[in-house]
Image: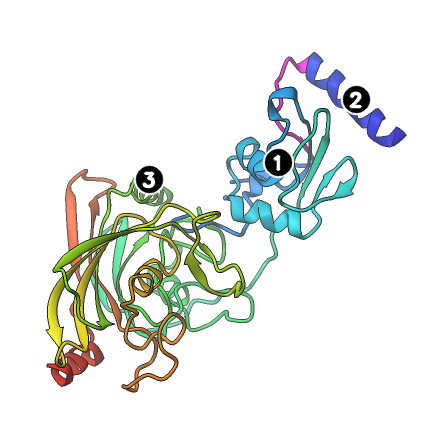
Amino acid sequence: MQKIENKLEELKKTKEEANISNDFELEGDALDDDELLQSTEPSVTSVGTHHCIVTENQIGVRIDKYLSDQFSDQSRSYLQKLVKDGQVLVNDKAIKSNYKLRKDDVVTLTIPQPVSLDIKAEPIPLDILYEDEDILIINKPKDMVVHPSAGHLTGTLVNGIMYHCKENLSGINGVLRPGIVHRIDKDTTGVLVVCKNDMAHAHISEQLKVHSITRKYNAIVYHNFTEDEGTVDAPIGRHPIDRKKMAVNERNGKHAVTHYRVLERLKGNRFTLVECQLETGRTHQIRVHMAKIQHPLLGDTTYGPKNQPYKLQGQCLHARVLGFIHPRTGKYMEFEAPLPDYFQKLLEELR
């Protein structure tokens, strides 16, 4: 306890002398710079140990929300991971992410050095729809993971674009995700933008944040629709029981909106070809929203029937259209990826 009181007095004195508010202070060397991908890597400017003191207007705030507000260059998911890993202490004690702050709590946050993983460039064939000095538009095939992760370091889109672009990729999302500003699932096909520099990354990321990017998907779903179009407005978060899945979560989910319209009714109205336009971009959004309204995607054994009538590799979902303001020219550009062969053959069979 004496150690905590000494630290509190030391920090109060330092803050008074520096005439600063409740910002974090860095112990250690400041390095160079690091959602829309929520990065699980630290901003390397912040590697080290940080201390702060909770003030009266911050009493009752959850620790993860508090850290996110105070340390805005870090993603909230990364900060939550640090809490879980015991890298966040309150009064020298480990806490959970739902801990609510009390007056004069001393918060200590330690951001470790990022783990260095050897991500190798690989000569993977890429279906390039467009390329210039700032962006690369890719038509991603099925069964390709967008970026490496622990235990899955090869054969990803990132390995391929590293070979194609050499050093010309943005570094904002860290060593595992160079150039990557958004992603689609392994078994979802279609159009993705890759950013070749940080300027382009920042511009595209901002457009994703304000939901101004056009993103249209084609999907084959179960059952007939009584209406020709509609909107699903339902928050999405982690499934309360199965943490590997997402779900409509009214309590802890994030705002999520999907607009859909019927393109074609198939196989005696047993299936429907729909276009889904994303207003937001949550994990598994289309898959979760369509399942919520009793129209799960054909091939999706995670959110739909376990026994599938056709031999498919994952959900029948294709990112067909992507449109945005070009980061350098300021002009709107739109790109379209043709339906993959498996999708077209399935449509023919269902007609």
Q: CA distance from mark 1 to mark 3?
A: 26 Å
Query: Residue 54 in magenta?
Result: no
Which residue bears the numbered disc 3?
Answer: 206
Lower sequence index among marks 1 and 3? 1
Amino acid at dot 3: Glu
Amino acid at dot 1: Ala
Residue sitting at x 65%, y 20%:
56
Q: CA distance from mark 3 to mark 2?
A: 39 Å
Q: Place residue 270 in its image quadrant.
A: bottom left
Lower sequence index among marks 2 and 1? 2
Q: Residues within 10 Å of mark 2 (few under 14, many from 20)?
A: few
- The span picked out in magenta is 17-26
Image quarter in which the C terminus is found? bottom left
Residue sitting at x 12%, y 82%:
348
Q: Does the image show residue 113?
A: no
Which residue bears the numbered disc 2?
Answer: 10
Q: Residue furthest front?
A: 226
Which numbered mark, 2 or 1, is in the foreground of this view?
A: 2
Q: Which mark is residue 30?
A: 1
Q: Secondary structure at mark 1?
A: loop
